[in-house]
Image (cartoon, rainbow, N blue to C red):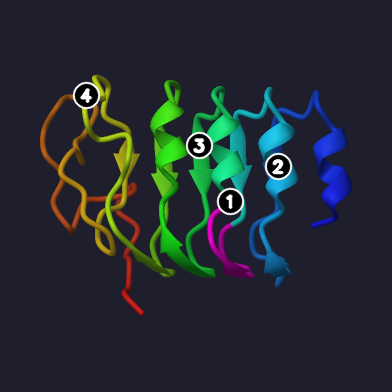
Amino acid sequence: IPTEIGLLTNLLLFLCATNQMTGTIPTELGSLQKLTMLDLHTNLFTGTIPTELGLLTNIYDMSVRDNQLVGTVPSEFGNFSMIGHIWFFDNHLTGSIPFCDGYTAAPRIDCLEIECSCCAERDGTPCNGDEIADSESAGNS
């Protein structure tokens, strides 16, 4: 993804799933303040999840699953107030989900690779490993 992506400030959706994209996720995606959906799943991205993605305060759906990402979920993700669905699985991530503490409307997230104490369905029912992330199967690497 070219760094010039950050110049598209009116972009609402960025869908680049299953494109065999390589390299790191550009930090410039954090400049897309109007973005509501970011889908980068099933590519070959490496490195860490950029902390700048935590600036996407209008984001509702985010998927970085099925890549080769390492590290932790950035603490800046605690800024997400609109998030509804988020997928991290099939990477090499560790740690916990930063927006769990005090989050009132629990998003649908996958919790199979990283610690997640807040995983819950919209009705407040706790998730279990078989029903997370819209029933998509997840594997650990």
| Residue that numbered label 4 is attached to | 102
Whichever of labels 3 and 1 marks the residue nearer the N terminus, that label is 1
110 to 81, vertically: above or below: below
State the quadrant of the C terminus.
bottom left
| Residue that numbered label 2 is attached to | 29
Q: Disc number at residue 74?
A: none
Could you give the CA–CA distance between mark 3 and mark 1, rounded to whole angstroms? 16 Å
Describe residue 1's horizontal placement relative to residue 118 as left or right. Answer: right
| Residue 111 x, y percent position in the rendering | 25, 54
Segment tinted magenta in the rendering: 41-49
Q: Quadrant of residue 106?
A: top left
Is residue 118 part of the magenta span, yes or no?
Answer: no
Which amino acid type corresponds to the residue marked 2 in the rendered image? Leu
Which amino acid type corresponds to the residue marked 1 in the rendered image? Pro
Whichever of labels 2 and 1 marks the residue nearer the N terminus, that label is 2
User: Which-is-in-front pick, marks 3 and 1?
Assistant: 1
| Residue that numbered label 3 is attached to | 61
Whichever of labels 1 and 4 marks the residue nearer the N terminus, that label is 1
As helix, strand or loop, the secondary structure at mark 2 comes to: helix
Could you give the CA–CA distance between mark 3 and mark 4, rounded to whole angstroms? 20 Å
Could you give the CA–CA distance between mark 1 and mark 4, rounded to whole angstroms? 23 Å
Residue at the (20%, 41%) spot, across then down: 119
As helix, strand or loop, the secondary structure at mark 4 comes to: loop
124 to 62, vertically: above or below: above
Crowding at label 1, few (<14), some or many (≥20) Cα neighbours within 10 Å?
Answer: some
